[in-house]
Amino acid sequence: MSDYAPLSDQQLPSDLVAEMASLSSKAVPADFFILVEELKSRFGQSLDAVLLYGSCLRSHEVGEGVVDFYVVVDSYSNAYPERYLAYLNAWLPPNVFYLEVSSQENSLRAKYAVVSIADFERGTRQWFHPYLWARFAQPTRLLYVRDEIIRKRIHHALASAVVTFLKSSLPVLDSSVVDAEAIWINGLTQTYAAELRPERATRAQQLARINLDDYARLTAHAVPALVGKLKSLPNGHYQWLVDETSHRRSLWHWRLRRWQGKVLSVLRLTKAAFTFRDSISYAAWKIERHTGVRVEVTPMLRRHPVLWGFKVSWRLLRRGVMR
C-alpha cells in the first residue's frame, strides 16, 4: 500500500541528489572512524556502506552516548556466518547489534543496524511504513562506502527518502500555505507517532529547528518531484495542492502506519533481545535519558527479556511515557 508510485533514479531531481551527497560527505570527528574500522573488520567483503545518524551526529561527538550507525551489506548470507541471523534480517530488517571499542582509556559505544543494499533502496522508496525513509530523509553522514557505484546508489536512496517523506506527509497538513519548518515538523511528528518511541512530544519540533537550513534546501530541491502536490511561493513559503479525498486517504494511511508501527516495534524489540547484547539495560537507559522516567532492570527482567519487556512496554504505554 502506498500513497504514490515510487520515483525512478531518472525522475529524482539532480539538485536534490547533489544536496544529499553534499550533506552526507560533511566532516565528522575522528572518533567515529575508530568504530567504523571495527565494523569493517566485522563485515569484511560483505560491507557496502556505513552511515551515521542520530543524536551523536547532531552533537558532533561520541561523548557518553551511544552512536547510531546503519551498516549496509551486499547480502545477508554474506554478512553472517550464522544462518539464523541472515534469516532474521531478511524476515524483518534490520538486525540491531551493540559495539564497544576501547580508545585511549575511553570506551566508545555504538549500536548498529544491518540492512542489505536492496532493502535499503526499497525502504527509502517503497515501504509503506516510514521506518527507513523517515530516518534517511534527515541529515546523515556516509563514513564508508565500498566504491563509486555504491556511493551513487546510497545518494539516490537518500534523495528518494526525502521525496517519500514529503509525498507521504504533505497531504495531512491542515494549512494549504506553509513554510519548510511547518512541513518538517508535521512530517517528523507523523513518523515519530508511527513507532514506539520514548521521546517527548516536542521532539519533532526540536529536530526540525536544529536542521532547519538543511530542511529548507531539501524542500526547495524536491519541488520538481512534487508536481501537483507542492508549489513554491515567494518568501520561502509553499502551497500544497492535495484535494480533500487525498487528504482523507492520507489520514487513514497514517492511522494504519501507527498500528503497523506498534506491531513492528514490538517484533523488532523482541528480535533485538537475541542480537543486541544487554538490550534491556540499553532500553532502560534510553527511556530515562529521553523522559526522565527510571525503569528498574530486575533479575527477572534479565532472565526473561521478551516476556518482561512486553510487561514494561505496556506499563510505559499506559503511563504515556512511550507512544
Image (cartoon, rainbow, N blue to C red):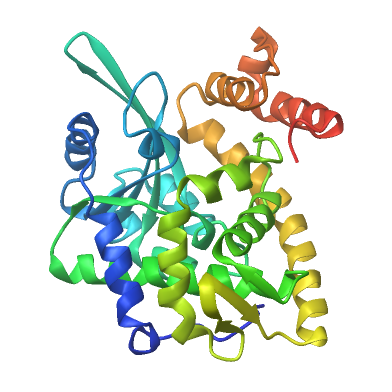
Does 241 sit above or below residue 152? below
Q: Is residue 34 left or right of residue 280?
A: left
Is the C terminus in the top left, top right, bottom left or bottom right quadrant? Answer: top right
Q: Is residue 76 left or right of residue 310?
A: left
Observer-nearest of 247 and 271:
247
What residue is rendered at 48% in x and 81% in y?
223
In the rendered image, is residue 119 in sight? no
Picture quarter containing residue 296?
A: top right
Name the residue located 15 percent from the left edge and 58 percent from the top edge. 146
Q: Residue at x 32, y 34 (%)?
A: 60
Task: Specify the farthest residue to the left.
Answer: 147
The spot of residue 83 in percent (x, y) is 38, 48
The spot of residue 166 in percent (x, y) is 56, 71
Q: Which of 217 and 242 lies nearest the eye of the viewer?
A: 217
| Numbered marks: total | 0
Is 160 placed left or right of 176 in the picture?
left
Q: Is residue 12 visible?
A: yes
Q: From the image, which quarter does the N terminus lie in?
A: bottom right
Q: Is residue 113 above or below residue 305?
A: below
**278 or 185: which is nearer to us?**
185
Q: Is residue 181 above or below residue 233?
A: above
Residue drawn at x 40%, y 39% is 58
* Position of residue 184 measured from the top left corner of the image (x, y, whole percent): 58, 60
Tell me where residue 186 sits by quadrant. Answer: bottom right
**Does residue 311 appear left or right of residue 309 in this picture?**
right
